Amino acid sequence: MSEIAHLGPVELLTPTGEESLRFFVDVMGLEVEAEEGRSAYLRGWGDYQRWSLKLTEADTSGMGYLGLRAWSPDALERRVAAVEAAGLGIGWTDGDLGRGPSYRFRDPDGHVFELYHEVERYDPPEHLRPSLKNVPQRYTGRGCAIKRLDHVNLLAANVRVNREFCVDALGYRLYERVELDDGTETGAWMSASIAAHELIYTRDAYDAHGRLHHAAFWVDTREECMRAADIWLDNDIFIEAAPSKH
């Protein structure tokens, strides 16, 4: 069993703070859990933690950091030791909203991660309190009604090096990969849970470092995904790739 319980939360950076916030709240259907400084903390209706997306106004777009929750305090210490042994550690932080001490590090490509264990469970206000006990929040049905964060795809100048680090130091399992005829690895799909993939690396076409490809959010059915495309169309959201078998 991996010592990483799951991926998330993720901090996304945006140069258009108000517009991006409206998109995630009104179109994607996330709830604002808190606002602090230039950041808004958002959640899907199925997130057991207080939030899964931190949206921060910045000079550029991209990923601020990606969180990884360890199964236990002991698992956290072991993963921190493995990262430090790889020479990629940055150091401990106080964490973030509703989250305890977190260890910050970089992968070989320069993306920033935080390992943590202590986290607050979501306690909904009365208007979002569900009748069912097996869901953390009432289903609002607003916009795409996103349930939770699903996976993150990172670009990398060298996919193989990053994949090996995630497998060796973090304990991720490799599920799929793409290797070209010349031996270059251009994609790696990994997971620490029962999910088909949580953390993906794909080759950066410009050989740049530390760039984000995409963050993906989960809805329960194919029909909800198709409905999301209609909602984006009605809101003039450009669709780069239409819904497909993937």
Image (cartoon, rainbow, N blue to C red):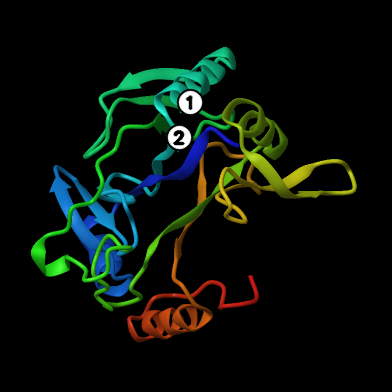
Picture coordinates of residue 108, whole percent (x, y): 59, 28
Count of residue discs: 2
- Location of the C terminus (image quadrant): bottom right
Q: Is 127 or 222 nearer to us in this picture? A: 127
Residue at the image point whose x is 30% and y is 44% from the top: 59
Q: Is residue 103 left or right of residue 79?
A: left
Q: SS for tag 1?
A: helix
Picture coordinates of residue 78, whole percent (x, y): 51, 20
Question: Which dot marks residue 187?
Answer: none
- Location of the N terminus (image quadrant): top right
Q: Is 229 or 72 nearer to us in this picture? A: 72
Residue at the image point whose x is 11% and y is 60% from the top: 125
Q: Residue furthest right?
A: 181
Question: Which dot marks residue 71?
Answer: 2
Residue at the image point whose x is 32% and y is 53% from the top: 48
Picture coordinates of residue 55, whole percent (x, y): 28, 51
**As shown in the figure, which amino acid type bears the numbered disc 1?**
Ala
The crowding category of the residue bearing disc 1, from other C-alpha atoms within 10 Å (few below 14, some 14 to 19, many at least 20), is some
Q: Is residue 75 left or right of residue 180?
A: left
Q: Residue furthest left?
A: 126
Picture coordinates of residue 56, whole percent (x, y): 27, 47
Q: Is residue 145 left or right of residue 74?
A: left
Q: Is 185 or 83 nearer to us in this picture? A: 83
Taking 72 as reference, is 50 above or below it? below
**As shown in the figure, which amino acid type bears the numbered disc 2?**
Trp
| Separation of residues labelled 2 and 1 (CA atoms) | 6 Å
Q: Is residue 156 left or right of residue 142?
A: right
Question: Which dot marks residue 75?
Answer: 1
Q: Are marks 2 and 1 in contact (CB under 8 Å)?
A: yes
